[in-house]
Amino acid sequence: MAFLTRYVDDDSRPTVGSALRDIVVRAVLPAIALWLVIVGIGKLIEGPLGGLEGESSINKSLQAGRTATWDAVTMVWSHIGNTEIVIGVCVVMVALIWWLTKQWWVAIIPAIAIAIQATVFVLATAVTGRDRPQVEHLDPAPPTSSYPSGHVGASTALYLTLAAMCQRIPNKGLRYVLTVICLVIPLLVAYARLYRGMHHLTDVLVGFLNGIVCAFLAWNYLRRRRKA
């Protein structure tokens, strides 16, 4: 059974109880290990690595190259990763996928991904205290640590799961276009957060790590049977 087609290869309906159990065992518990890794990296950056001061040159270079046009463009890209936007897109997509597939256990995958990502992010920022880059911030700075990037983590978790779901689209051209869009969006968010002075490079990279792993855990949350 291929990873991306696991819900097509086995479309059996789970009980709510078994699905909840699988979420805990196969998604929530592994996410604890992810949180430990992210916190460990954060503590290394705060301590032995001395904040990775060399990263500041990236933020300063991007600040020096700012233009009114790119300020406007990156504002839109940055907003794509905002909590309210991510949640809104997720709710719409869960409802749409549920309606199209009649499979609630598949439709909830994006919600699982962003819920786990958000939990790991919030708990990680609670025990790390990295300051924002020392450049002009073009977005309001939320009262959380700069590390890791929640915008990048949330958009990555959401759009990777949607990219996986796009593989069920029978029209090859449409499948390709939508998959590429879903994969590009987190990259645009990441660039915008760097350009707008909201994160260091490692904040963004660990945000990707958080989002990718949470998307994997969400997609893999339900036990499926291999075809004979």
Image (cartoon, rainbow, N blue to C red):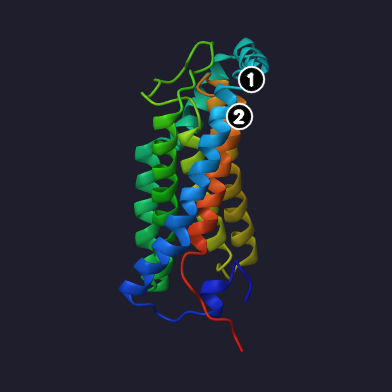
Asked if residue 91 is positioned above or below residue 154 in the image, the reply reads below
Observer-nearest residue: 138 or 127?
A: 127
Residue drawn at x 36%, y 45% is 87
Asked if residue 161 is positioned above or below residue 22 in the image, the reply reads above
> Considering only order in the chain, which callout, 1 or 2, is on the residue closer to the N terminus?
1
Observer-nearest residue: 50 or 92?
A: 50
Badge 2 is on which residue? 202
Q: Secondary structure at mark 1?
A: loop
Label for residue 29?
Answer: none
Badge 1 is on which residue? 52
- Residue 94 is drawn in which quadrant? bottom left
Image quarter (top left, top right, bottom left or bottom right) of the N terminus: bottom right
Observer-nearest residue: 55 or 139?
A: 55
Residue drawn at x 55%, y 57% is 216
Percent across and percent down for residue 12 are: 44, 81
Relative to 46, 114 lies left or right: left
Q: Secondary structure at mark 2?
A: helix
Percent across and percent down for residue 51 are: 59, 19
Query: Is residue 188 in view from this perspective?
Result: no
Instruction: Tell me, yes or no, whether the two marked residues, 2 and 1, touch with CB atoms within 8 Å.
Output: yes
